[in-house]
Image (cartoon, coloured by chain):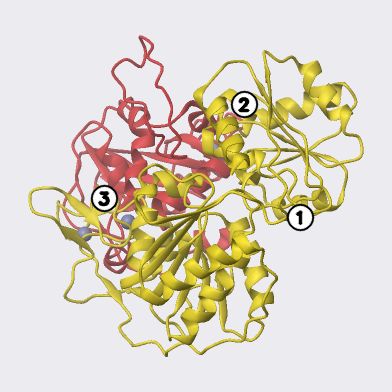
Amino acid sequence: MKCLLCAEHFIPVWTPENLFTSQRTCPDCTMKFVKSGECADCGKPGRTLCADCVRWRLKGEKLVTRTLYLYDAAGKDFMRRFKFLGDPVLIEVFRSDLKQVRMKVDWIVPLPLSAERIADRRYNQSALIAKRIRGRKRNPLSRIDLPASSGLTKAEREGRENPFRLERPCAGKRILLVDDVYTTGTTLHQAASVLRAAGAAEVCALTLFRSV
Amino acid sequence: MLRGRLVRHTGPHPGLIRFKAVTWRCRRCGGLPTPAPCTCGPFCRYCRHCLALGVLRSCDTLATDPRPLDPPKPARLIPKELTPAQERISSRIEQAIATGSRLLVHAVCGAGKTPMLDRGIETSLRLGKRVLVAAPRTDVVRELARHFEAAFPDADIKVLYGGSSDRLQVGDITISTTHQLFHYYRCFDTVIVDEIDAFPYRFDYRLRRAVRRAAKPGASRILLSATPARLDRLLPVVTLSRRYHGFPLPVPRLHLGYRFDDVKAFILDHPDAPRLLFVPRVSQLDVWQRKLAEVGITAETVHAADPARAEKVERFRTSRGILLATTILERGVTIKNVQVAVCEADRFTESALIQIAGRAGRSTDHPDGDVVFFADDRTNALYGSIDAIKRANRG
Ligand SMILES: [Zn+2]
Ligand SMILES: [Zn+2]
Ligand SMILES: [Zn+2]
């Protein structure tokens, strides 16, 4: 079989655990990704609750985010190819990881892209991630275009206006938000606050990567 | 001046064409595209094979710059001394270029293939035919460029490879890697392809298609090879079985059932010559380097993805060191008085072994050299390559 990431041929090794999952990457490429760490709210390695998450809790905006892997060199390379070079098939690399996600929620909500951004990129990377998770997918949010978040400092990011708007009611629903990378968590918290204000019962989040 | 360049924009022609009842094909590289989500609808596809050149979706368009190119100007040639055998091939090449026909030049390694092209290229330019010289490897392209820049000092020469400054341009003489030819469509009247048996080109139908599409219809095609495949031999062939200095090719010694001590003995036998050791895989470079370090022999390693590859090879040329290499050094590299050993030779292909043996004894001062194949097992490739070299020496 041909590895999705390095295009080398490899022979899949079947074990009772992975008999029903498809292996799309060679063992070398699979080993490159590092599982995220201890923080209960964001998976940052080091402490059981990291300094950022303590601050969010003090503000009264606790958002439990499950992150699958650390955003290290391998993660950055993956996101560069998946998002910026435009290779959406690469999401198959995390197919079995995402399939194993089981959360007691009513709706799975991928973070939307602004109209301008999606016309440019042609697909929403968060929606592709959400598609691999079991459950009902809904899009109650929309997003307006603000200057790109990459290249801003932490303070600038946190002080920004909320780009999300509510499109349809979500009162009483338990919601799982899905995004690609958790950097400072501002974007996810903004979306969560819009949903909470609209009466969502419970909001949690899932991202592929946690930046370190 | 960007010419003959393919630009992606919105227009009437779809980027991926659909063949009836077969499948979709990428119009740029000819590969099979992959279905992917897209805003245009559920049946969009994109090509992963040429993703490095930018995404091309079936809802995108691919356009060619249709402006006509200026006719090439004749260039002054500084002629090189040729042996009578080379002279014979050279005039055949010239004739093929003038009549727009095809020719396969089967010449042994170190026969001096490149200088034989000079007169043909001069004729081509005089007749107003644009010349493309393509090779699958960047190292080979650099060596070709060095030669032609010396032979045609005032011609318009463009050298294309990944990261070169001339990318997407067309010169009177264009020297290019085959990968860069995806950007060209019907640009060249004379196409010369060197090393047609080299690794990515022989098995990659996309690269062969790129070369075909870069040529104008009716262009003359000259293929050069030391180990042509059987299918290529159907073309008109000229054969040159002598090296330019007239000495025979060094015949490889076969060492079956080798131990590490045998390799060590080979290294110690030639203390004052550069020694080149080939291993079949990149991961084995470190293993061999460590093994040699244990017995007090320092060796450098080089492989295709090595960023310092050009400097290492350049340093090796002038030193008396030991270089461990994967098959990237098998072609187009001339090192004086080099001694060659192949570790695990049973895992190499026949053409790779012939090319490796052809590294030795290329210069007139040192026309012989030691070539040893260390193998654990007998393979057809081992005996086939030794046989081919002996046959070439008989003439
Ligand atoms: Zn945290
Ligand atoms: Zn393609
Ligand atoms: Zn599309």
Q: Is residue B249 left or right of residue B213?
A: right
Pick whichever of labels 1 and 2 is earlier in the sequence: 1
Q: Quadrant of ligand 3?
A: bottom left
Residue identifier under label 3: B33
What separation in Å lies between label 2 and label 3 (alpha carbons)? 37 Å
Q: Which residue is mark 1?
A: B311
Chain name for mark 1: B
Direction top: furthest residue: A16
Name chain A's colour: red
**What element does badge 3 sit on?**
loop
- Residue occupying image coordinates x 46% and y 46%: B228
Mark 2 and mark 3 lie on one chain; the one further toward the N terminus is 3
Residue drawn at x 63%, y 73% is: B148
Q: Amino acid at mark 2?
A: Ala
Q: Do callouts 1 and 2 mark residues in contact (Cβ within 8 Å)?
A: no
Residue carrying label 2: B345
